Amino acid sequence: MYRSHNCGELTATHINTEVTLSGWVQKSRDKGFIVWVDLRDRYGITQLVFDEERTSKDLIEQAQNLGREFVIQVKGTVIERASKNSKIPTGDIEILVSELKILNESILPPFTIEDKTDGGEDIRMKYRYLDIRRNPVKNSLIFRSKVSQEVRNYLSKEGFIEVETPYLIKSTPEGARDFVVPSRMNAGEFYALPQSPQTFKQLLMVGGMDKYFQIVKCFRDEDLRADRQPEFTQIDCEMAFVDQEDILNVFEGLTRHLLKEVNGVDVEKFPRMLYDDAMRLYGNDKPDIRFGMEFGELNAVTQHKEFGVFNNAELVVGIAVPGGNSYTRKEIDKLIDWIKRPQVGALGMIYSRCNDDGSFKSSVDKFYDQDDLAKWAEVTGAKPGDLVCVLSGDKNKVRAQLSALRMELAERLGLRDPKVFAPLWVIDFPLLELDEETGHYHAMHHPFTSPKPGQIELLDSNPGEVKANAYDLVLNGNEIGGGSIRIHDKETQAIMFKHLGFSEEEAKAQFGFLMDAFQYGAPPHGGLAFGLDRLVAILGGQETIRDFIAFPKNNSGRDVMIDAPAPIDDKQLTELSLKLNLKS
């Protein structure tokens, strides 16, 4: 037996108990006549004491030679700690050691295994197995486990069946680029890793499983953005004989359950917002509604003067910044520099100060009088003491720019409290999205999303106006889940493929198995998938997902710990019937 107790459970109730502990040496303090050692495992830290009045000389010398991260086993007696530590659960006791065994030595770690470490992100990624010993990462992984368990508890009670689907599948055009896997036994042919189990969960509905879920790895070979991973985890769910309302109710329930069981928070309201309203009021389809600063469209009150910047713009839009009139000119200039960054791409910003006496002072006073500026304040909801920030230009671009500014201002103003949770359903997305470069439409969600009832005919006359029977669940400005009611008949699916540019032959080659299945009595069905990594991070009060993943990739998609991806040797290439054609 390596241990009778763990390093986080002993308290004053165990005084005079003989115990055996094992763990890592966190640190030691040597006073010559007495040595203290902090012993750490997953559960906590227990202080060991080696006292020359009660400990043999050989044992004290052995303790003095212990290094950081040595793995040791000790036996001893629980005694009352003279100098108690109220910051840890074991702070009332210590172990008077009678036996010490070194189970494994350790070289000096490349960074300190402390909550606040001296290791940068790159070095901690390279030695991730050491980083996991630190409380912030360890606790994040434990937290993720708790969330996953609560997901399983809730869905199982709701009658969902957990079913595994294949990882080696067929490459299909569903949006992002596939990771492909060569088949040795089928020369010249390839599997793909799933971007999602989409077609399989639909086939499970055809198979009569009725309610399915899976916590599953998904893969997308796309250029990485900040806080994205090439492999990610979904809580994937599908239900038969349901409409949109059924699905929204079930997954509101799951979200309430998680917030209550994991965070101790009761959330009753799950407001719903049309996609068009989300874009108009917040500039994006995942608005953070923990705070205001809704957009005010100003075309009608700005495009009547000789200010060409506004007159030539497709959209003039502004927000009211609470208390923003206190900003100095230098602070406003810095804000303008922030939105001019390439990541945002705005050309500039017009502003209007709302003074406490009801007057206004604008950067374009030459063109707009007090009555004009009062209308700006009215449209944006600005009050005395606020600052109205205005952008103009192409509708889609300027909405995205103002949305970025809104989020940045909220961060600076402390309006994004991670302990406050504001869920929101965004519904009625467009079914199709126009690619401005190619002039072709593609599915905004995926090719299996059903149009809203009665709108299928619009595909021929006005495809951009067709609404999808689709929905996203947003939490604190992040999309945590999305789904749709699926097409469940062959004829409608064929129409959808046609409008996405598939010929009959291409549709059959790519998705013939699904179309065939629909001929055997496919039930009406729909589902939703949560992004587990993002969901866990938000519930944990964090913005980044990396610490909630045991072994994440860096921003280049590399695992720097195991040095992957890596070349394979010529023998393997020959077995796989592959030949490299790398351009220098």
Image (cartoon, rainbow, N blue to C red):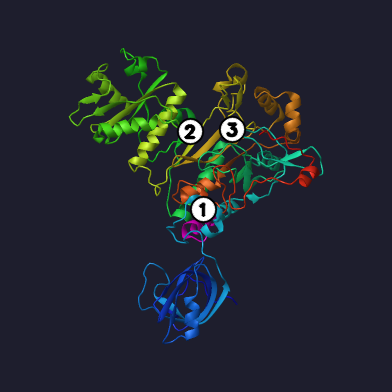
Q: Which residue is mark 3?
A: 445
Tell me the crowding category of disc 3: few under 14, some 14 to 19, or many 20 or more residues within 10 angstroms, Cα based. many
Q: As shown in the figure, which amino acid type bears the numbered disc 3?
A: His
Q: Residue at x 42, y 25 (%)?
A: 398
The Cα–Cα distance between marks 3 and 1, rounded to whole angstroms, is: 38 Å
Q: Secondary structure at mark 3?
A: loop
Give the magenta range: 132-146
Would you say the residues marked 3 and 1 are in contact, meaning their CB atoms lie under 8 Å apart? no
Would you say the residues marked 1 and 2 are in contact, meaning their CB atoms lie under 8 Å apart? no
Q: Secondary structure at mark 1?
A: helix
Q: Which residue is mark 1?
A: 123
Q: Earlier in the sequence, mark 3 or mark 1?
A: 1
Q: Quadrant of the N terminus?
A: bottom right
Q: As shown in the figure, which amino acid type bears the numbered disc 1?
A: Ile
Q: x, y (%) of residue 412?
A: 34, 40
Q: x, y (%) of residue 447?
A: 64, 31
Q: Is residue 168 visible?
A: yes
